[in-house]
Image: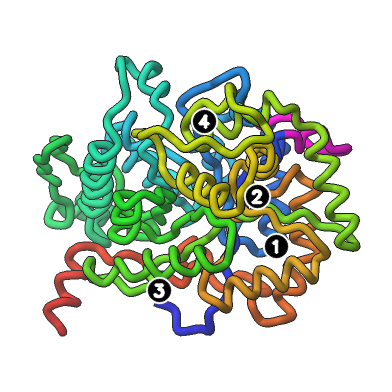
Amino acid sequence: MSSTARQMHMGVFVLGTGNHSAGWRWEGAATSHLQLPVMQEIARVAERGKFDLLFISDSMVMEPTDHPSFLCRFEPTTLITALAATTTHIGLGATVSTSFNEPYNVARVFGSIDHLSGGRAAWNVVTTSNPKAALNYNRAEHIEHELRYERAQEFVDVVRGLWDCWEDGAIVADKATGQYVDAEKVRPLDHKGRFFQVKGPLNMARCPQGHPVIIQAGGSPSGLELAARTADVVFSVVQELGPAKAAYADLKGRMAKFGRTPEEIAVLPGVMPIIGATDAEARAKLAKLQSWITPTNAVTLVASRIGYDVSGYPLDGPVPPPPKSEGGRTFHQVLYDMAKRENMTLRDLYNLTAAARGHWVVCGTPAKIADTLEEWFVEQAADGFNILPAYFPGAFAEFVDQVVPLLQQRGLYRRDYEGTTLRDHFGLDPVPAPMARRHAVGAE
């Protein structure tokens, strides 16, 4: 682990049409999530801002009423592989579901990306909350929530085990003797578990990072346990400082039982910054974006986030209580609890959801936004932030060019990259090969 002073980490959540569902309508904004030049420009801005991570989400379902970027999009691992060729430092993260894939394939894909990028790959582990996804994968119904997380625990263990099948220096490539691989340094996995049987090894040498970085975002108790045991980075959904501090402490407090220290996970709440020269100008920007949202579209967004249909309820009435759901529970719980606590109407809730899909919105001058992020960081509600620009590239460039320099001046954020891998950026050591780990334990 790095011994340097604590500094913020930054990720950017990339949706080509903008994270605001109407962001694509802003003058000069990108209107597609399916154009490589758009993605390359976003990556250039991220590297100019010395960001740790560029992140691409995914969805297993397409609905006509979805956010525009969900309607037509690149498969994320394909996209970050392309971006690896035109970037030099930024980490590249992609979502791949444990419910609709096999560990061997996932281990190979992210191992390949880690090699191709020189150690900058990250896997966002999700179990997929939308029950309709099962219909696209030869299933009549989705796996029950707790079972999905039990499967995910084993899935991650198998992937990490496959990454560990090769020791350092296994490739000899001795032209004089003709030996290419030291067979003593490559072993099968021979995994036999409840959900998976995987022989191994991978047909790939050990990754530059040892293991690519693992991201997790689940907020249910099962999701938090998975994160505390396996994640290097956690994306959180928060709205207020107090609950954010409590959630941060809860997650960090779960790590000791897995033999981990709090510094081994970076918690990055999602935040949409709306920036103006004055607070009034920033509020006007947000109001303009909100004016493009129809109640029908916004109610659909609310339903997708809180997991139940609210279309039959009055917009100016209270938010109806949720039924029992097997879907994702993070947004569901945060949004409903906030609505109940603040006596929000359904209209209030859909305005919030339409703005940032349930994430936190910070609206104001660059200094005000820097002050707010500093407060959350210093108060240990966050280790940094996953920035959700309302539209690209303009809103993202504003944050990089106007807010980042203020954080740098305050000594809260790097002025340049100090390493070449994503683990370097997060202050994490490379994951040692199994033989090196055994030797380290034996030396203690």
Q: Secondary structure at mark 3?
A: helix
Nearer to me, 280 or 78: 280
Q: CA distance from mark 2 to mark 3?
A: 24 Å
Q: Is the C-beta separation of discs 2 and 1 under 8 Å?
A: no
Q: Callout 3, which amino acid?
A: Glu
Task: Tell me which label, 1 or 4, sits earlier in the chain.
Answer: 1
Q: Is residue 242 visible?
A: yes
| Label annotation for residue 263 | 3
Instruction: List x then y, in percent, for residue 351.
Output: 70, 40
Residue at 11% x, 40% y: name it.
193
Residue at 49% x, 67% y: name it.
426
Q: Secondary structure at mark 1?
A: loop
Task: Tell me which label, 3 or 4, sits earlier in the chain.
Answer: 4
Magenta-drawn stretch contains 337: no
Residue at 40% x, 33% y: name it.
323
Q: Which residue is mark 2?
A: 388
Instruction: List x then y, in percent, for residue 77.
Output: 48, 37
Judged by depth in the image, the label closer to the viewer, 1 or 3, is 3
Instruction: List x then y, in percent, for residue 243.
Output: 50, 63
Q: Which residue is mark 4?
A: 75
Q: Secondary structure at mark 2?
A: loop
230 over 412 or under it: above or below: above
Q: Which residue is mark 1?
A: 49
Which segment did they paint magenta? 22-33
Judged by depth in the image, the label closer to the viewer, 3 or 4, is 3
Query: For the C terminus, which image quadrant?
Result: bottom left
Q: CA distance from mark 2 to mark 1?
A: 14 Å
Nearer to me, 179 or 406: 406
